[in-house]
Image: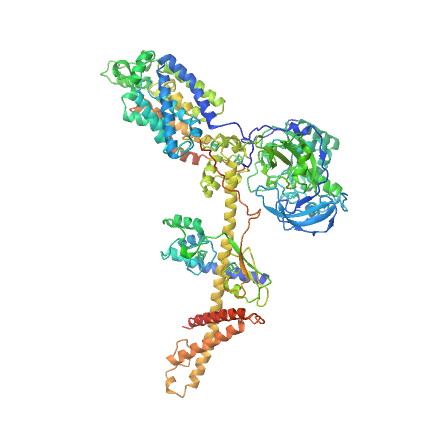
């Protein structure tokens, strides 16, 4: 049963450091004093809070409702009292805050009423809504709402469902442990996903440095009697666990940036996601906990089943952090993000809390100039030329950087990893990307402002014209009146009775203007706000002054149209 | 609602055709660089008139405070002119802000609505007015007309969606 | 505190340069064996000059000295200069060449990583134009003892014609030209007969073919160490071989054999150490092939029809000019955008 595997370009082999955290089984975590559950935990819209301070919530109760086309619900991870719905620091390098629900557990850990579904008898749309409301998102780190990915492509079916158990990042072993300990449940989740996607075959890709996981999954497949599902050991090379890279390794298909993989007949899910889909469908349990590896600068690295919202330091304390610990990293050493503090909460994206110190992860040696050695290009799994992108990012020539496919960069860090000049290449790429995005936003809003400004001018112009037309009509009438009234007098003898806009004489013209101005004044007076009763005298005075100015303005404007 | 949208669309379409006919590519390019705040600080009634004036050689390139130094640099590049620091008589570069109406004080006088160049204020006579933050350009033109001084400018704070990665600091230890 | 990745490979510019220097050692050993220890003196002079020049420029440009001096890139340039200049070049020639390379070609263009031209080759070209006679004196293998060499390098001893000849490349070309001339006493001799002289060995110049072998060995080791890729050496040797084969095949009496071309002059040094300079060379795989093949053809043309003893230096500079264009045009398709 030898499957043909494909290679992806580049990649690196950092020290895996995985064995340390797989010696002990998955452990549970005692309830913390406080859970901080950010409402925005997944790609897409910001869920709106469904609870208020003081509310009592039950475990699994929805506290954040999905909002918009792409969004995912959030739930209370345990029963307790909502202490606050407020801004709290989120697990993000920026150190910015986000709206979070802060729950004080009551210690009972009492579930709300759970509702299961039978995925075979539920219409697909309802099933997707169910998963959205169960808060199931991709647990590999991208936290993309899973329901949105559980749609087969245009053809209504899929060739290959790829399940990602590669886990290529050093230190992280939560997927490994999941596959070892919960393979059969995970498999049930996979079967459900396969059904929803109508996938012909399922390939579970696992890096070959996890033989126990491969064996356990293979045993589970055998026990389940399912056919067309295969656990495939793939060569260990970072970033084999990148969705695109894994799809490439298993199927040979390269999904370009910005394209949906279903267009190519494949879809990819993380093993953890498969397990949470099982939990949701089989038990009705929403996503309120996940497996988290605690590793790095701790005496007892291990995997824990952690409630979402648990402060990271509460969790890390169990693993015995060493005294020189100076940082937490969420994720692995290659792509992980530095946390702004120790008490930020574990969220759905937290696959690992990597505890670090200055000796464990020393600052890179000083950056030297790029010598164009091409090491980065050799290591880049997206076949990019990082040094060219770096050159243009550094000089802020973003257009050129994009020409070198900046947005195809998956920020895997391989280039920074190998660069002999110690250039933080990925930092430059992240910088360029966010700069380009912000410029696009600015441009969009400038374009909007320009349109609205032009529209306003256009509208004012039109209003002026309309007014002018009205005035012209009025003037014609006046002129006629003037003409008839003055018919007896010789002065008006040369006046033309026809409503031609050409003024007939000085007197007539002045009369016309007078009339127009009077009319304008009257109109303005009608429009003038009358809701300014009962105001303080100084405010009244202000308003009077403004009114005076405004009245002066249209009078000037009225001069022009008739000419 | 749909009717309004349709009418607006038609009008906008018409406006765009109208402007296209008159469009001058250089003015377009300059206008694309200007921030479209429409604040008039440059001494012209909006960004486009200023763009036209620059194109005609009647205005300096350093009169737009919202565009700031970066804007001036881009204009200098586009026009092949020398870079100049922002002219002080036209104002100073400020962090981007939006106007906020204190809803408790607003008397619903509509003066600000008329002043706003980009229709970012909604409200009707005697009704409370609100500013659509996403559409406000921060031009400050609505501040002066307000009879009860209930409009203030608030600097835009960073959110996760607008947060940017900083330019990597190059630290070469001096030896 | 830095951002991800938090771990890095233990690679540095210094270690890269150090390995390049190590890879030059076999050739230097052969050089010493056949031509005497004078080359070691040249290497020392050039290294000292390069470091001094670099230090001065770094001080003027306000760059950290310790960091950039220890990256060893200046030493690599210095060694390449010493190895391409005649071993008995007077010390000031070596020093001037090295300073030109480091100060003008490298630092004035922005220092490490910024120079569009290969510093060693640019210096070589400048010096051969400025001092054609001094740059063309090559002793034959074993001809001069160490003392004479030292005298030549440091002293005023200048019995130029008596003790030095041209490089084998030069000699053969002159010989071939004479052979083609009916008035010459060499007229009518074949290439193989011309190469019978004491200056020639099995393939190329006597002794120098062993040095070429040294470069080959060092170069292959560099490929093994993944410092360089196979593209440039293979394309260079291949294209040089092919163009030599073409003309030699047509007129074996008028042109040197392909193997002679490969084993002579700066061919091996160029293929493995000069053209592979990443800063001034092409970087994309296809670009490298084009770049090296172009350099080989230029080298062959200059060697066979030009006035200079060797063509590698000029060919390198010519191709350096084309690098931005080559790199731009040969960008490989990125992930997911390949047509296959
Ligand atoms: S690895 Fe570093 S030094 Fe080498 S080409 Fe890439 S950026 Fe430049
Ligand atoms: S971070 Fe981007 S450029 Fe660097 S190796 Fe990864 S994909 Fe390539
Ligand atoms: S100063 Fe104001 S109106 Fe003038 S160009 Fe700048 S943003 Fe536009
Ligand atoms: S709301 Fe005020 S500050 Fe904002 S765009 Fe309108 S007038 Fe300018």
Q: Position of residue A274 (x, y in %)?
A: 69, 38
Which quadrant would the C terminus of chain B be assigned to in this image?
Answer: top left
Q: Is residue A47 left or right of residue B59?
A: right
Q: Position of residue C141 (x, y in %)?
A: 34, 13
Q: Is residue B82 left or right of residue A324?
A: left
Which quadrant would the N terminus of chain B be assigned to in this image?
Answer: bottom right
Query: Viewer-proximal residue, C40 or C177?
Result: C40
Q: Is residue C340 visible?
A: no
- The colour scheme is rainbow
Q: Position of residue A337 (x, y in %)?
A: 58, 38
On screen, B147 above or below A377? below
Q: Find residue A504 and report its image quarter.
A: bottom left
On screen, A297 above or below C168? below
Q: Is residue A550 visible?
A: yes
Name the residue located 59 percent from the left edge and 28 percent from the top edge: A15
Q: Position of residue A476 (x, y in %)?
A: 45, 78
On screen, B2 above or below B167? below
Query: Viewer-proximal residue, B20 or C19?
Result: C19
Count of numbered tags:
0
Question: In the current view of this chain or complex, which residue is farthest to the bottom?
Answer: A488
């Amino acid at each position: 049963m030898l499957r043909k595997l494909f290679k992806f370009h580049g990649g690196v082999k950092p020290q895996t450091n995985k064995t340390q955290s797989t010696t002990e089984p998955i452990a549970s975590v005692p309830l913390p004093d406080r859970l901080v559950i950010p409402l925005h935990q997944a790609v897409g819209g910001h869920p709106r809070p469904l609870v208020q301070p003081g509310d009592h919530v039950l475990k699994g109760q929805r506290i954040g409702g999905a909002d918009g086309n792409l969004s995912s619900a959030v739930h209370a991870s345990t029963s307790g009292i909502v202490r606050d719905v407020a801004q709290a620091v989120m697990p993000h390098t920026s150190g910015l805050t986000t709206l979070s629900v802060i729950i004080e557990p009551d210690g009972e850990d009492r579930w709300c009423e759970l509702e299961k579904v039978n995925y075979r008898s539920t219409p697909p749309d309802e099933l997707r809504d169910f998963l959205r409301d169960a808060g199931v998102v991709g647990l590999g780190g991208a936290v993309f709402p899973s329901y949105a990915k559980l749609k087969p492509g245009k053809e209504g079916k899929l060739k290959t469902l790829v399940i990602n158990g590669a886990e290529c990042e050093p230190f992280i072993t939560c997927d490994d442990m999941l596959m070892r300990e919960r393979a059969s449940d995970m498999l049930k989740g996979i079967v459900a996903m396969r059904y929803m996607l109508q996938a012909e075959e399922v390939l579970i890709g696992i890096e070959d440095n996890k033989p126990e996981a491969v064996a356990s999954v293979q045993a589970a497949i055998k026990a389940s009697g399912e056919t067309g599902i295969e656990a495939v050991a793939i060569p260990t090379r970072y970033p084999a666990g990148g969705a695109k890279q894994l799809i490439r390794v298993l199927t040979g298909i390269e999904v370009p940036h910005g394209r949906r993989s279903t267009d190519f007949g494949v879809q990819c899910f993380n093993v953890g996601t498969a397990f949470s889909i099982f939990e949701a469908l089989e038990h009705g349990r929403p996503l309120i906990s996940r497996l988290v590896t605690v590793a790095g600068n701790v005496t007892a690295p291990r995997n824990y089943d952690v409630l979402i919202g648990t402060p990271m330091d509460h969790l890390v304390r169990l693993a015995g952090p060493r005294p020189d610990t100076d940082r937490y990293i969420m994720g692995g050493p290659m792509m992980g993000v530095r946390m702004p503090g120790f008490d930020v909460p574990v969220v759905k994206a937290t696959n690992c809390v990597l505890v670090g110190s200055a000796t464990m992860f020393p600052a890179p040696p000083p950056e030297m100039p790029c010598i164009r050695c091409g090491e980065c290009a050799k290591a880049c799994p997206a076949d990019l030329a990082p040094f060219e992108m770096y050159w243009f990012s550094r000089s802020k020539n973003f257009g050129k950087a994009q020409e070198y496919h900046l947005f195809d960069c998956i920020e895997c860090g391989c280039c920074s990893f190998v660069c002999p000049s110690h250039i933080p290449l990925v930092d430059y790429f992240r910088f360029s990307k966010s700069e380009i995005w912000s410029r696009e936003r600015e441009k969009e809003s400038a374009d909007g402002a320009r349109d609205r400004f032009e529209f306003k001018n256009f509208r004012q112009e039109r209003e002026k014209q309309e007014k002018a037309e009205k005035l012209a009509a009025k003037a014609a009438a006046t002129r006629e009146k003037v003409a008839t009234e003055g018919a007896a007098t010789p002065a008006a003898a040369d006046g033309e009775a026809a409503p031609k806009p050409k003024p007939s004489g000085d007197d007539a013209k002045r009369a016309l203007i007078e009339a127009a101005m009077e009319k304008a004044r009257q109109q303005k007076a009608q429009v003038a706000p009358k809701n300014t009763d009962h105001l303080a005298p100084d405010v009244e005075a202000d308003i009077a002054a403004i009114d005076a100015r405004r009245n002066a303005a249209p009078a000037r404007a009225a001069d022009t149209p008739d000419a | 609602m749909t009717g309004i949208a349709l009418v607006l669309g038609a009008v906008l379409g018409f406006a765009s055709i109208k402007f296209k006919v008159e469009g001058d590519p250089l003015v377009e390019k300059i206008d694309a660089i200007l921030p479209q705040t429409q604040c008039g600080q440059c001494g012209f009634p909006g960004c486009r008139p200023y763009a036209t004036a620059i194109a005609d050689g009647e205005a300096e390139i350093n009169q737009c405070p919202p565009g700031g130094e970066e804007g001036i640099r881009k204009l200098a590049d586009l026009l092949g002119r020398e870079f100049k620091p922002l002219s002080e008589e036209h104002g100073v570069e400020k962090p981007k802000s939006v106007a906020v109406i204190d809803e408790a004080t607003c008397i619903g006088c509509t003066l600000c609505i008329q002043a706003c160049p980009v229709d970012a204020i909604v409200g009707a006579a005697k009704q409370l007015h609100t500013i659509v933050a996403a559409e406000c350009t921060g031009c400050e033109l609505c501040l002066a007309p307000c009879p009860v001084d209930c409009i203030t400018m608030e600097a835009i704070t960073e959110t996760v969606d607008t947060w940017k990665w900083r330019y990597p600091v190059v630290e070469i230890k001096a030896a | 505190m830095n951002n991800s990745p938090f771990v890095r490979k233990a690679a540095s510019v210094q270690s890269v340069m150090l390995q390049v220097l190590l890879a030059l050692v076999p050739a230097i050993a052969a050089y010493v064996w056949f031509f005497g220890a004078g080359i070691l003196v040249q290497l020392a002079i050039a290294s000292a000059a390069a470091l001094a020049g670099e230090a001065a420029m770094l001080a003027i440009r306000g760059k950290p000295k310790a960091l950039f001096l220890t990256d060893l890139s200046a030493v690599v340039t210095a060694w390449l200069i010493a190895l391409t200049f005649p071993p008995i070049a007077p010390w000031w020639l070596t020093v001037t060449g090295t300073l030109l390379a480091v100060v003008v070609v490298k630092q004035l263009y922005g220092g490490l990583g910024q120079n569009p031209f290969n510093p060693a080759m640019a210096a070589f070209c400048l010096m051969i134009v400025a001092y054609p006679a001094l740059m063309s004196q090559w002793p034959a293998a074993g001809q001069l003892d160490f003392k004479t060499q030292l005298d030549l390098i440091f002293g005023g001893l200048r019995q130029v014609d008596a003790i030095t000849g041209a490089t084998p490349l030069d000699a053969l070309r002159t010989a071939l030209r004479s052979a083609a001339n009916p008035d010459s006493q060499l007229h009518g001799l074949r290439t193989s007969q011309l190469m019978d002289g004491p200056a020639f060995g099995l393939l190329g110049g006597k002794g120098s073919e062993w040095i070429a072998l040294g470069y080959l060995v060092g170069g292959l080791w560099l490929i093994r160490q993944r410092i360089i890729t196979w593209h440039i050496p293979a394309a260079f040797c291949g294209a040089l071989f092919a163009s030599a084969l073409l003309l030699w095949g047509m007129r074996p009496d008028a042109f040197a054999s392909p193997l002679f071309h490969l084993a002579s002059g700066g061919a091996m040094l160029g293929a493995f150490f000069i053209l592979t300079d990443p800063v001034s060379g092409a970087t994309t795989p296809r670009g490298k092939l084009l770049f090296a093949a172009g350099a080989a053809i230029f080298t062959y043309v200059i060697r066979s029809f030009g006035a200079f003893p060797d063509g590698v230096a000029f060919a390198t500079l010519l191709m350096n000019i084309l690098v931005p264009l080559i790199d731009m045009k040969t960008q490989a398709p990125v992930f997911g955008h390949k047509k296959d």
